Amino acid sequence: MTGRRDLVCAWLASRSCREIMRKSRSPWHIRDDDSPGSSSTDASFMTLLSTAQHLARDTRRDPRSHMVLIMVAVTITAGAVALVAYLLWPTWVARPASAPDRLPVSVGATLFNVPTAAIRRKIQRHSGPQERVDLSFVFPSLEPPDAPKHVSADTIEEKVQPIDRIFVSISAHHDTLAPDTRVRTIYPRYLGQAATPVDEGLTMRAFRDGSPYANEDLISATAPSLNARCTRDGLTPGMCLSERRVDGADLTFRFPRSWLSQWRDVANAMDRLTAQMLGPKV
């Protein structure tokens, strides 16, 4: 019996051989010295051989079935990892921090909300108390202008570009004479007697030569209200200056004299800018 079993073990894999040895020790196994009969020995051998063949077939099938399961598990794991990575992958784009659209600025203890892009000087682009703020707006849209473009000797144009901006300066007045008071009490001392109509509702009075305001004219209107000192055209185009007081600050508007042909639009634009920067009263 031992010799036949050794032959079977040589034919089968080592794993099957160990399994056969284990099963051969089962309760139904009959040792050689218990029953020398050939029928019992043959029956045991046939049972052993059948079991060995069955285990050999299982052994040959196991590696492939295990590999299939491993491949399926790896595929599922890779898909899950890819799905989680896709869902958690950041979709935002890093961008440089930008300044707010408007800045709260206190000038002469008066609060203004000014567009950041309209501030002309970089040193003034901060919130909080300031002595003066200089701004510019595109006319007639009254939007902040675009960033200035780089100009070189090759790209500059010789032709003078028209001025399309209205300039605004907000400064603390420190209890100086109010602009409307200056129009009523100071300017008349230096004005000529004759008033010249410029447009319907708009009049002009020239300042006398030798006065502090020589080469200037006073432009006035009542509906809408407008008082402006305008230089006369010469080597450079004439400019107009109009002032108004709001609490502890004076607003000074500057615009080309040529805009007097649409003076109502200019007067309304100054009113709109003042209201927009002050905001609603609470």
Image (spheres, rainbow, N blue to C red):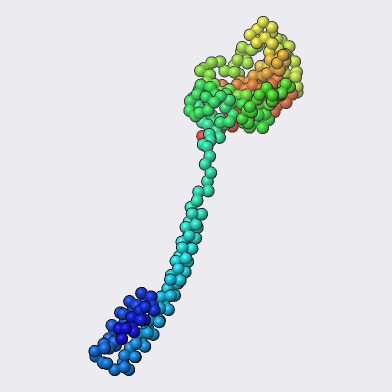
Q: Which of 46 and 218 is in front in this view?
A: 46
Is the N terminus in the top left, top right, bottom left or bottom right quadrant? bottom left
- On screen, residue 11 versus residue 150, left or right, reads left
Q: Is residue 28 above or below residue 154?
A: below
Q: In this view, does 242 lie above or below 69?
A: above
Q: Tell me the residue at 42%/79% (across/down).
A: 57
- Along the line of sight, which residue is nearer the eye, 105 or 39? 39
Residue 113 point in image, percent of width and height: 54, 31
271 up-or-down from 228: above or below: below
Kindly tell me whether residue 251 is visible in this rendering. no
Q: Which residue is drawn at 65% across and 10% down?
A: 213
- How far across and how far down the image is residue 74, in percent? 46, 63
Based on the displayed image, in which of its 4 quarters is residue 235 positioned? top right
Q: Residue at x 50, y 58 (%)?
A: 83
Residue 209: horizontal and vertical position, in percent?
Answer: 69, 6
- Asked if residue 152 shows in the view, the reply is yes
